[in-house]
Image (cartoon, rainbow, N blue to C red):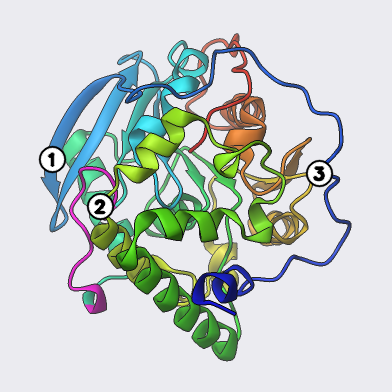
Amino acid sequence: MDEAERLRQTVPPAPGPSPRLDRPRRRGEALGRLGGTADWGQLREVQAGGLSWRLRVGGDPAAPPLLLLHGFGWDARVWAPLLPALDLAWSVWAVDLPGHGGTQPPVPVAEWELGRAASALGSLLDDLGIPSPTVLGYSLGGRLALHLALQRPLAGLLLVGASPGLDEPEARATREAADARWADLLRQGASDFWQAWDAQPVFATRRGGEGGLSPGAREIRLSQAPESLAAAMEAFGLGRMAPLSGRLGQLSVPTIALAGQWDAKFQAHAETFARAIPLAEARVAPGAGHDVPNEAPEALVQALVALAARASTQPSEPRIPLPRKGVHP
């Protein structure tokens, strides 16, 4: 068994019913499929919290702020197809996470973890004049959003495919070793890394060739610097993350935890958030696996509308057009 195959088997499928990969699926039109470089909004670069950040700003400047935090391997360009569904009601701020896009990598790795990254992100928000936005975080971005919420008040929190961390030290050690192997594979070549990464069971419900991604999405991923992504993997991987299950009760922010219908593992995490966070609820995105932004982008918009109705910074009218399939943070 080669290293890529061993890594694909590192995280086994979650217990529960297996997704039906041959089930009928609705396909959207061109809107929502990433193409070209997916440039949008105003590009800005800001020094804050010990990092040089790159971010994109769009939407209505007078509307409540919405912070978008992407998943591992992407950057702020991937939110472009959602902008038509957001810019009527939000001032949209999307950052490149550390080690992604144009944001400085977290080096030396030994000095970084998600808590420090959240503190640096908080400094950026203060400098931008949006200290308490509503935050949408997907996967790695969701874990960063959770740390941010524990450090400062937020208007609302949408956790998508997020985890509160691993409680058992043995599980964290095993995962940290696996993350180190993923980082080593990434340094050997991005193409082989992404082929192995997309073959993990957690992404099995994505359909189509090339990992179920559009050409524009693949272009964004392959434009990332492998060494910077490897540093992010090592610094922010689940194995390095301190478990947060015991701290969730400290949160007082209106929260929605969203997971895909076919993602039993992260549905369980969403239920954990709903039980532990006083103002939280769990929701399921129909027809999606772990990759909710790609498989059910309309579920993100619907959750934001619901969250805005509960949060103090409520957009004046939730008349938001739903995007079609194909966005991939």
- Magenta extent: 98-110
Q: Which residue is mark 2?
A: 225
Q: Horizontally, is 112 left or right of 72 in the view?
A: left
- Residue 105 in magenta stretch: yes
First in sequence: mark 2 or mark 3? 3
The secondary structure that dominates the magenta segment is: loop
Q: Give the answer, above or below, for where 159 lies relative to 120.
A: above
Q: Which image quadrant is residue 199 in?
A: bottom right
First in sequence: mark 1 or mark 2? 1
Q: Is residue 216 visible?
A: yes
- Residue 104 in magenta stretch: yes
Q: Amino acid at mark 3?
A: Leu
First in sequence: mark 1 or mark 3? 3
Q: Amino acid at mark 2?
A: Ala
Position of residue 165 measured from the top left corner of the image (x, y, whole percent): 55, 70
Residue drawn at x 66%, y 57% is 202
Give the spatial CA distance, label 1 vs label 3. Answer: 43 Å
Q: Which residue is mark 1?
A: 46
Q: Residues within 10 Å of mark 3 (few under 14, many from 20)?
A: few
